[in-house]
């Protein structure tokens, strides 16, 4: 048994040493540095919530040298940011994106470099669920929760498997009080768009809503399939919904034929492929059901719906 443990210990230490060659410290806030991963040649992936300034960003490499970095783009909705560095022969992370799929109970390690030295924590994957959407509309390929200690400065560092392959980026900025891992597939997709555009293209309507119960008499009269809708409580002046004729006090029933019962249902219909495209919206107005055509716009970074 001692031989097995010793062998496992050596394999984990080797995996940390290998993956750690792509982990850097990022100086972009007042407190302790955050971590980042050299994702592609000259490209470092970090977490957005740890990048508190757009300029005067520096990166400490594994050999303890410090280089300047420029912010290529950020996406608060997925808590990802991309930095660019020049003139470095830093090792690029070995990514595990497609196979084998991550499993509950799999032994994993979280790495960080909250300063010049590499740090590590180990544990297991506690749950893997399907795609999910953050409160700001970010699309994450899988909800990965960890039974791993995530220390200060670990956000932006990688989650790795026992062979040193990067499974994703760890963050404490998406789920309150819970550390999650942004899967490598999500990171790769977001990083590509940030490098191309600097922001992530997502659709929005420019409305505020709240769920309301529709009286039974009105449900029967209008032959509705649901007794819950979304009361429109705000409409951005000149925004997509305003231009489409949506009014304060309308009760939104459906978007593109799908019932909407809360704000998440609206966000689910507002992917980046919807920008500039018309959407059929069924609403109750004046006791009658009407259908409007709303053309989604490109959402500013601060907008949710």
Image (tube, rainbow, N blue to C red):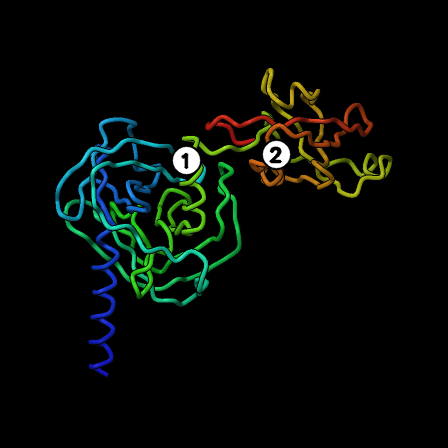
In the picture, residue 84 is in which quadrant? top left
Left or right of 272 on screen, residue 109 = left
Callout 1: 10 Å neighbours few (<14), some, many (20+)?
many
From this viewpoint, which residue is outermost toward the bottom? 1
For marks 1 and 2 on the same chain, the one whose residue lies earlier in the sequence: 1
Instruction: Judge by depth and name the residue closer to the eye, 84 or 215.
Output: 84
Q: Position of residue 183 (x, y in %)?
A: 42, 52
Instruction: Judge by depth and name the residue closer to the eye, 266 or 212.
Output: 266
Vertical side of 10 occupied by 99: above or below: above
Left or right of 200 on screen, residue 286 = right
Quarter in which the N terminus is drawn: bottom left
Callout 2: 10 Å neighbours few (<14), some, many (20+)?
some
Judged from the image, the secondary structure of the residue bearing numbered disc 2 is: helix
Q: Position of residue 137 (x, y in %)?
A: 51, 38
Q: Which residue is mark 2?
A: 274
Q: Which residue is mark 1?
A: 194
In this rendering, the count of numbered labels is: 2
In the picture, residue 9 is in which quadrant? bottom left
Vertical side of 115 occupied by 107: above or below: below
Q: Position of residue 259 (x, y in %)?
A: 71, 41
Instruction: Judge by depth and name the residue closer to the eye, 130 or 20.
Output: 20
Q: Position of residue 139 (x, y in %)?
A: 50, 43
Residue at the location (35% across, 49% down)?
A: 169
In the picture, residue 107 is in which quadrant? bottom left
Quarter in which the C terminus is drawn: top right
Q: Could you say which disc has been placed on residue 15 in the image?
A: none
From this viewpoint, which residue is outermost toward the right? 221
Q: CA distance from mark 1 to mark 2?
A: 19 Å
Residue at the location (62% across, 40% down)?
A: 265
Judged from the image, the secondary structure of the residue bearing numbered disc 1 is: helix
């Amino acid at each position: 048994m001692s031989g097995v443990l010793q062998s496992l210990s050596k394999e984990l230490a080797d995996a940390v040493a290998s993956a750690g060659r792509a982990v850097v410290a990022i100086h972009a806030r007042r407190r302790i540095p955050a971590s980042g991963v050299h994702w592609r040649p000259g490209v470092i992936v970090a977490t957005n919530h740890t990048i508190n300034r757009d300029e005067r960003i520096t990166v400490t490499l594994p050999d303890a040298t410090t280089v300047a970095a420029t912010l290529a783009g950020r996406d608060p909705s997925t808590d990802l940011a991309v930095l660019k560095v020049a003139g470095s022969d830093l090792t690029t992370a070995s990514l595990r994106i497609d196979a084998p799929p991550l499993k509950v109970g799999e032994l994993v390690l979280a790495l960080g470099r909250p300063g010049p030295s590499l740090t590590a924590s180990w544990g297991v994957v506690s749950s893997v669920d399907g795609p999910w959407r953050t409160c700001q509309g970010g699309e994450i390929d899988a909800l990965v929760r960890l039974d791993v200690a995530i220390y200060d400065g670990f956000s932006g560092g990688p989650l790795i498997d026992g062979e040193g392959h990067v499974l994703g980026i760890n963050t404490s900025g998406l789920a309150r009080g819970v550390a999650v891992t942004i899967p490598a597939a999500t990171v790769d997709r977001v990083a590509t768009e940030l490098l191309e555009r600097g922001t992530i293209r997502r659709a929005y309507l420019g409305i505020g809503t709240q769920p309301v119960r529709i009286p039974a008499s009105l449900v029967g009269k209008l032959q509705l399939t649901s007794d819950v809708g979304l009361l429109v409580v705000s409409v951005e002046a000149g925004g997509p919904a305003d231009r489409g004729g949506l009014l304060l006090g309308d009760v939104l029933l459906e978007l593109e034929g799908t019932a909407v019962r809360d704000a998440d249902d609206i966000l689910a219909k507002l992917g980046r492929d919807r920008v500039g495209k018309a959407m059929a919206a069924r609403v109750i107005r004046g006791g009658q059901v009407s259908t409007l055509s709303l053309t989604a716009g490109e959402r500013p970074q601060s907008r949710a719906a």
